[in-house]
Amino acid sequence: MLARDNQDSLRRTPLYDLHVSLGGKMVPFAGYDMPVQYPAGVLKEHLHTRSKAGLFDVSHMGQLRLRPKSGKVEDAARALERLVPQDIVAIAPGRQRYAQFTNADGGILDDLMVANFGDHLFLVVNAACKAEDEAHLRAHLSDDCIIDSLADRALIALQGPKAEAALAKLCAEAPSMKFMDAGPHKVAGLDCFVSRSGYTGEDGFEISVPAADAERLAKTLLENPDVLPIGLGARDSLRLEAGLCLYGHDIDTTTTAVEAALEWSVQKSRRTGGARTGGFPGAEKLLAHFDQGAARRRVGLRTEGRAPVREGALLFADETSGEPVGKVTSGGFGPSLNAPVAMGYVPTALSALDTKLFAEVRGQRLPLTVAAMPFVKNTYKR
Amino acid sequence: MTTTLYTSDHEWLAIDGDVATVGITDYAQQQLGDVVFVELPKVGRTLKKTEAAAVVESVKAASDVYAPISGEVLETNEALAAEPALVNSDAQGAAWFFKIKIADKSELGGLMDEAAYKAHTA
C-alpha cells in the first residue's frame, strides 16, 4: 500500500529545516525533498488557503534574469520572443505575463512567468525543466542577453484572501499591487522581487528572497495566525480547482497552446496578421491550430459520483464503446467543491460544455460532464 | 472473544468465529492522509487472498486494499460511502470496510498479532 523512495540524492531548498521543524512530510519532487503536507493535512491546508492564507515553498522552481547586452530591455524582450509565442515587448515595466517555450512542433517545452523589471527581464520556470530551460536560453539568446541563473534565491508563495493583509505588514507597497504586477520591493527590509500572482486561483503573492534570508522571512510570515504552511498536496488540489495546467501532465511537448485551451496567453501581435507574427519555434504548427482549429482540446471534467477520476484514466464517448476518445491528464478530489474534479484532452467535437463522457476507473465506466474551468471562481485583484 | 490480526499491507482483521471484520490500520490512515472516497466490494463476492478488494482514496491518491484472506463478503460498511473521513477518525473501529466468511482458517497463520505489527511499522 505504501512505497518509499530513495531520498539519497535529493536537493534541499533553503526552507528544508523549517519544513522538518513544522512537521512536514517530506517526499521527492522534481529532484527536491519537499513537504507534501504538514500535520494539518491536505484537506485543511487546502481549505485554509481559500479562507485565510497559505505559505508555500516554491524555491525548487528556477529563477533567471535576462539582461540585454544593449542595455535596452526591449532588446531582451525581442530576443525572448524568438523562443515564446507571447508578446514580450508589450510587457510594461513592473508587469508580468504567462508564457510558454515552444518546440519545433509547436508543443510546449515548459511554461513560465516573464516579468519586466525595467532594465532586465525576470523569469520563473518549472523545477523539473530549469536546467534545460537555462541551456535553451543560453543556446539561443547569448548574443543579445546575459543570462543569470538566480540559484541563490528562494521563492515563497503567499496565497489566499488574507495574503494582502499579511504581506502589507512587511511590505508597504503590497496592497497597491494589482494581479500580475511584479517588481523589486523591500519585504521585512530584505531585497525581494514581489509579484501579485500564484498557482491557486486565489489572490496572493510570490516573493523571491535571497536564500540566506528565506527562513527568517517565512518564519515572520508564519507568525501571523492567518498564515499556515501548505504542502505540495494542497498546492496541486488548489491549482486543479483553479483549472491551471501542471507542466508534464496537462501540457507537454506534444500539446500546443491551442489544444491546451491557452489561446488567451498568445497575444494577437504574435498570431497570423499580427505585427510580429510567428518567429518562434513551431510557429507554423501553432498558428495553423489558431487558424484552422485543433483536433483535440483540454477540457474540465466533473463526475456524478464521489469517486475521483485520476490522471491516466481513459475517456470514452459512451458507456460501451471500444475505442477511447481521450485521456485524463489531472484529476483528484476538490476539497472546496467537496467533489472530484479533473481535466483532460478530448476530440474538439466532444469539448462543448455539458458534453457527456465516460471515464474508465478500475474496469467501470463512470459518467462525466465537460465543465467550465476554473471550477472554483478565482479571486485575483485586477 | 475476538482476536485482531494484521497484514504487512496494513489491514486489520477482527476474528469472531468464522467471520472476519476487515479494515485498514490507524498507521495506514495516517500515511494516506484525508480519505475522500472508499469503494467497497459487493456483498456476495468471493474474494481470493491478496486480490484487490476495496479502494481507499485520499485527496492525492488511490490505494488498493487487498483481501487478507479468502472468503465470501457477507456485509460492507455503508457508513463509509456517506462519511469517508471516518477512516481517519476511527480506522480500527467504526471505519471497518467489510466482513468476510473465513474460507480457510489456515490462512490466518500467516498474519501478524499486534506486537508483530507494531514492530513491522516501527
Image: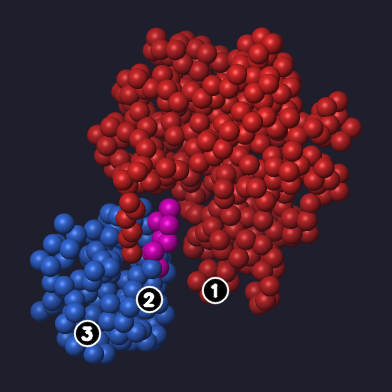
Chain colours: A red, B blue
Residue under the point 84% across and 45% down = A288
Task: Tell me what residue is drawn at x 70 percent, y 58 percent.
Answer: A346
Asked if marks 2 and 3 fall on the same chain, the answer is: yes
Q: Callout 1: helix, strand or loop? A: strand
Q: Residue at x 67, y 25 (%)?
A: A141
Vertical placement of residue B59 versus A139, above or below: below
Q: Position of residue A279 (x, y in %)?
A: 79, 32
Please state which of residues B74 and A332 is positioned toward the viewer in this rendering.
A332
**Residue A167 marker:** none
Label 1 chain ID:
A
Question: For mark 3, what is the residue?
Answer: B107
The span picked out in magenta is: B55-63
Marks 3 and 1, how far apart at CA: 30 Å
Is A352 included in the stretch rendered in magenta? no
Question: Which amino acid, mark 1?
Answer: Gln
Q: Chain of mark 3?
A: B
Q: Quadrant of the C terminus of chain A?
A: top right
Q: Are marks 3 and 1 on the same chain?
A: no
The residue at which mark 2 appears reads as B53
Image marks 1 and 2: residues in contact by CB distance under 8 Å: no
